[in-house]
Image (tube, coloured by chain):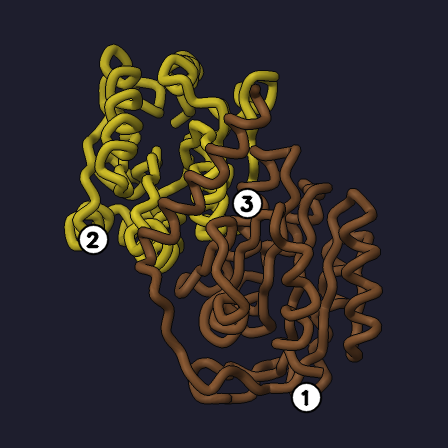
Chain colours: A yellow, B brown
Amino acid sequence: MSVSYENSKIVFQGIKDAGITSLSALPETWLGLLLQQAERDPDVKLIQVAKEEEAIGIAAGAYFAGARHILLMQNHGFLAAINGIVSLAMLYGVPLCMLIALRGHWGEPYPWHTRGGIVTEGVLRALGIPFEYARDPKTVGRQIREAYTFSQSSLSPVALLLTRDLMEEAL
Amino acid sequence: MKRAECIGMLYPELDDKLVVTIMGACAQELYDLGHKDNFFYLQHAMGLASSIGLGLAEHLPHEKIVVLDGDGSVLMNLGTLATLARYRPRNLVLFIFDNGSLLSTGGFNSHTTSGVTDLAAMARAAGIEHVAAVDSVMAFGEAAIEAFGRNDFGVIVAKVAAVGPNHYGMDLHLPENAFRFKRWIAARKAAEAL
């Protein structure tokens, strides 16, 4: 299975169209092509982290600074970042717009991704984090824009789950 | 040397800087000197103070950022040293008060107590060029002046006694702190733009 170049471009364009100028990320396979575009784009600041929880702090700093910032991570990175999400973002009313690659779900061939994929939606619900699935390249741009808008109005973390349908080439 | 003495020395320099401090004793000692809206107290989420500092520094190149961190917090997010080394925010100074203790949660020894783990050495090995390790008030003051004047990312690891304030409490709700901190920055940006 390979990552969809076309749809990675569409997602990146969606990020740009939402007026986002700053990204924090930990690279992962589905996000690779997207992050390469961010690296090449002079209008976008990309900050790579060593572990995803750092990005919660960076996103808070970016928000205080007035920057339009989103976070890109794998769902396992989301799971690794939960204390920061709860005890910084939620505690202080700091919005987070998270684009999360949903590995380990329908169609997943790799055993090591599966447990994280199975629990992701339940953890999001338990935390009260609003989320949507992004499956269709035709609507993902609007979903990114709306996720960002909602994070800012609700002062809450918001998650857009990037699915296999969107991120991998169709067979 | 006590951390409160160090923070007391820094305090007059903090009027025009964005300050992010970790939880517990460190936050309380800063607050007790007099709250300002350019101070953000991270009362939980241990380890992320320097990450907030990086986020501020990267997006506010004209502001000076000060992070007041501790050994227990840094040990929870060691990756931050490498991330900071990579991005080298030239408008950020990171103070790590190393009291060798998880003081605010009961005073258990931290990993630095034995002297085996050296946070300054770890910061250097992460690739941070300007790292000072100090254990006297005089040396702390000199290192701080040098770091503020340098216009480059610097880390100061200050060995301090494991003592804190005899009371805790702030007349400041956590979201209120965040809102006022953000507004202070926005007002500065608006004034700059005039």
How many residues crowd around disc 2 within 10 Å: few (fewer than 14), some, or many (20 or more)? some
Image position, residue A8 (x, y; %): 41, 19
Contact check, label 1 and label 3, Cβ < 8 Å = no
Q: Residue at x 68, y 63 (%)?
A: B10
Estimate the spatial distance between the alpha carbons at disc 2 and disc 3, rounded to whole Å. Answer: 23 Å
Q: Residue at x 49, y 43 (%)?
A: A61
Element type at mark 3: loop
Element type at mark 1: loop
Residue B138 vertical position relative to residue A5 in the rendered view, above or below = below
A152 or B184, which is in the foreground? B184
Residue type, mark 1 in image:
Ser
Q: Are marks 1 and 3 on the same chain?
A: no
Residue B60 vertical position relative to residue B140 in the rendered view, above or below = above
B141 or B134, which is in the foreground? B141
Q: Are marks 2 and 3 on the same chain?
A: yes
Residue assigned mark 1: B114
Image position, residue A154 (x, y; %): 22, 37
